[in-house]
Amino acid sequence: MMKKKTIGTLMVAALIVMAMLAGTALANGNEWIHAHKEFMGANETEFVTTEDVYARGYFDDSFPGQGGRICVVDHRPAWTDGDLLVDVSGGYETVGYGPGSFEFVLTWANPLALGHYDLILDLDAGVSGEWTDSGNITDPICSFFVSDPTGRISIEKTASPTAGAPGTDVTFTIAVENTGDFTLDPVIAVDILPAGMSYVSADSGGTESPEGTITWYELGPLDPHGSTTVSLVAHIDPGASGTLTDNVTVTGTLPLGGEVTDSDTADVNAEEQPPTPVEVPTLMPKGTMALVCLIFVVSAMSIIMRRRGT
């Protein structure tokens, strides 16, 4: 069962024209229609039930007072000339315009229910409620989906540097993004340091309690597609070695009280510190030892010669 919608204001560039008109728009081959999430926005094919749908299009007619109709109908894989256009938005709207080319924008104030739809610009307004593909007229079609809104959140964590000896300070950067369709509030991130690392500091109101657990309580509200980034600094402890894995989890609360979560990790390689080389003291410098040896040799030879002389 489709929700009945209230038709909003028809905005035509700098001119507003809204009338129930009959007639046939003379096609020139450049006609089009698109679905949008905002006025004059980008062409969209994915909507959720909480979003308004805007229709924007173009067609040309050199006869003032004639126009076309805008319909939202259930999707068909293929349309055939003469197929009925059963509007599900509470009744089609007719677009009128002056001579020459003209672009229009139409918005429905209430969102559509779940479904797959075709947004159709019915150029042959003189033939009531039929899709036309004959002569010089082919009614433009834009297909789009409407799904349930969902809540999602993502978190990404990086470390710099990713390796270091005991005594090294490591900065962890944590990026949080609301990737869903609802505003999240509050948004809370909890980081748990691994054994072998100690907390030094955190920005954006992060606090440590208990030891090794750092919490940011006020990262929200985060609107859909909104993001924020926080960071903390931790110290590689003496004696730490191997891979140290830091864990972080973020939780966002939906408007009706449900929660969405995500988590990520970042690894730091604690490098073993090489032992400090021990210098073995020598009894005397090499030059001094050579001199002593020489004196010893000379003295020994002198004693030998004396004894021979006696």
Image: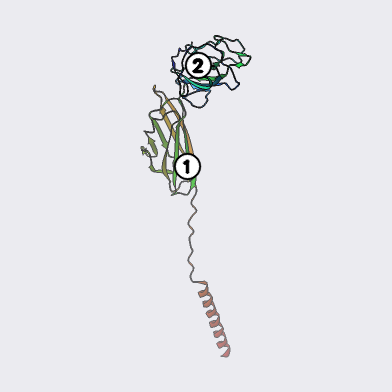
Q: Tag 1, which secondary structure?
A: strand
Q: Nearer the viewer, residue 98 or 254?
A: 98
Three-letter amino acid code of the residue under disc 2: Val
Q: Position of residue 154 (x, y in %)?
A: 47, 31
41 lies above or below 245: above
Q: Which mark is residue 95?
A: 2
Q: Tag 2, which secondary structure?
A: strand
Q: Quadrant of residue 303?
A: bottom right
Disc 1: CA contacts within 10 A as few (<14), some (14-19) or many (>=20): some
Query: On the rendered image, what quadrant is the C terminus found in?
Result: bottom right
- Side of 80 where 250 appears, left or right: left
Q: Position of residue 249 (x, y in %)?
A: 44, 33
Disc 2: CA contacts within 10 A as few (<14), some (14-19) or many (>=20): many
Q: What residue occupies the far bottom of the structure in this picture? A: 310
Q: Nearer the viewer, residue 170 or 270?
A: 170
Point out the frontmost of discs 2 and 1. 2
Q: Quadrant of residue 198?
A: top left
Q: Which mark is residue 172?
A: none
Q: Position of residue 79 (x, y in %)?
A: 60, 14
Looking at the image, can residue 243 be seen? no
32 lies above or below 271: above
Q: Nearer the viewer, residue 290 or 232?
A: 232
In the rendered image, which residue does mark 1 sit on?
159
Q: Quadrant of residue 101?
A: top right
Three-letter amino acid code of the residue under disc 1: Ala
287 lies above or below 1: below
Dot 2 or dot 1: first in sequence order is 2
Q: CA gap, disc 2 to disc 1?
A: 57 Å
Mark 2 near mark 1, Cβ–Cβ under 8 Å? no
